[in-house]
Image (spheres, rainbow, N blue to C red):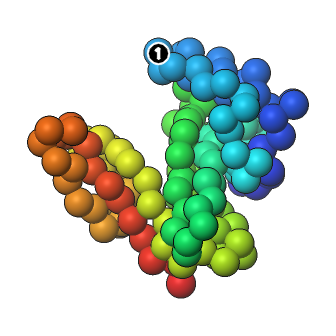
Amino acid sequence: MKVKKFNKETDYEEICEWWESWKLPVHPKEILSENGITISKEGVNICTSFIYSTDSYICFFEFAIMNRNTTKEQREGALERLGEELLLKAKSMGFKLAMTLGEDKQARTAPVLHKWKNENMNDMINPNLSQYWKIIN
């Protein structure tokens, strides 16, 4: 697997296609962080996510998306590698804690989130949504 910095100019159209294939909203290019990471295998981009900075020691990982038109073999280990690379990049940026939001069902299916600590959101917000966090070592 290869790791590359997400390039808004050359990679944006591709992740728009990914969002559309999953019937997810397409996010404007302007809201995407400059700190995006893409994992590829055999010349095919597999998944991407972005690090959002705060003015504290906490950062957020958001807008994770996977290429739906990949094989199971191509996807094997890609999300785990993406999570590792995001944590390495966040650490190099000086962050000590990473957070993300996810639906509870994701925690059962995503090995990356399964290992993170989580806290269910208030029922008034969304009872199926949790905050996930991991201390960056």
120 and 70: which is toward the camera? 120
Residue visible at 49% across and 73% down? 97
Quarter assignment of residue 26: top right
Quarter assignment of residue 64: top right
Q: Where's residue 72, x and y in %?
A: 52, 37
Residue visible at 64% across and 42% down? 48
Q: How many labels sit on residues?
A: 1
Q: Where's residue 27, x and y in %?
A: 60, 25
Q: Where's residue 46, x and y in %?
A: 65, 39
Q: Is residue 111 visible?
A: no
Q: Residue furthest left?
A: 123
Q: Residue furthest right?
A: 9
Query: The residue under label 1 is which amino acid type?
Result: Lys
Residue visible at 54% across and 16% down? 21
Q: Is residue 109 left or right of residue 1?
A: left
Q: Quadrant of the N terminus?
A: bottom right
Q: Is residue 26 left or right of residue 45?
A: left
Q: Is residue 116 left or right of residue 43?
A: left
SS at circle 1: loop
Q: Is residue 46 above or below residue 121?
A: above
Q: Where's residue 75, x and y in %?
A: 56, 42
Q: Residue furthest front?
A: 55
Q: Residues within 10 Å of mark 1 (few under 14, many from 20)?
A: few
5 and 79: which is toward the camera? 5
Residue visible at 23% across and 60% down? 119
Q: Is residue 125 above or below residue 78?
A: above
Q: Is residue 4 visible?
A: yes
Disc 1: which residue: 23
